[in-house]
Image (cartoon, helix red, strand yellow):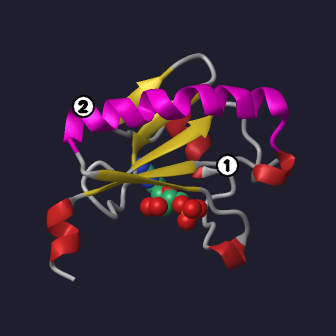
Amino acid sequence: MSETIFSKIIDGDIPSYKIYENDYVYAFLDISQVSKGHTLLIPKKASPNIYETDPETMKHIAEALPIVANAIKKAFNPDGLNIIQNNGEYASQSVFHIHFHLIPRYKEDIDGF
Ligand code: 5GP
């Protein structure tokens, strides 16, 4: 697949704020924060979407998700957390390297509605 901006982030060619990393995955703050602590979890092995991601890579993501969620909980103390994953332009995917959004939610943001 063609390289995306996330490959450059993994390689350190583009700076990012790291939340968690192991041999298989990298988690970092989204440049456009939907809420405080909005984090992206990506596999280091690039694939464009859920359809083309191999089971081994999905296993690494599944193992990392609760670790990253707990890191966010510890750092930002949110009241809730959404995990979102977009596939395809018509599902709002803009970077074609599979990624999971972890979006902390805060009581005070909801109370205003
Ligand atoms: P998507 O819309 O594909 O589900 O999400 C892609 C996300 O990548 C967006 O939320 C966008 O803000 C984020 N993003 C795009 N370019 C960069 C970048 O250079 N650095 C970081 N940290 N996030 C980025």
Magenta residue check for 72: yes
Q: Which residues are magenta?
A: 53-77
Q: Is residue 12 visible?
A: no
Say which residue appears at 79% left-offset and 26% top-offset: 56
Q: Which residue is mark 2?
A: 74
Q: Is residue 70 left or right of residue 85?
A: left
Pinpoint residue 54: horizontal percent, then vertical percent.
84, 35
Which residue, given by chain and number where applicable, does mark 1 sit on? 98
In the displayed structure image, the side of residue 96 where residue 54 appears, left or right: right
Q: Outermost residue toward the top?
A: 23
Whether 7 is drawn above or below 5: the answer is above
Mark toward the viewer: 1 or 2: 2
Query: Can you give x and y, in whole percent of width and height, for residue 74 in the image?
Result: 24, 31
The residue nearer to you, when weighing 69 against 23, is 69
Q: Quick one: 20 or 44, which is closer to the camera? A: 20
Within the image, what quadrant is residue 84 found in? bottom right
Q: Amino acid at mark 1?
A: Ile
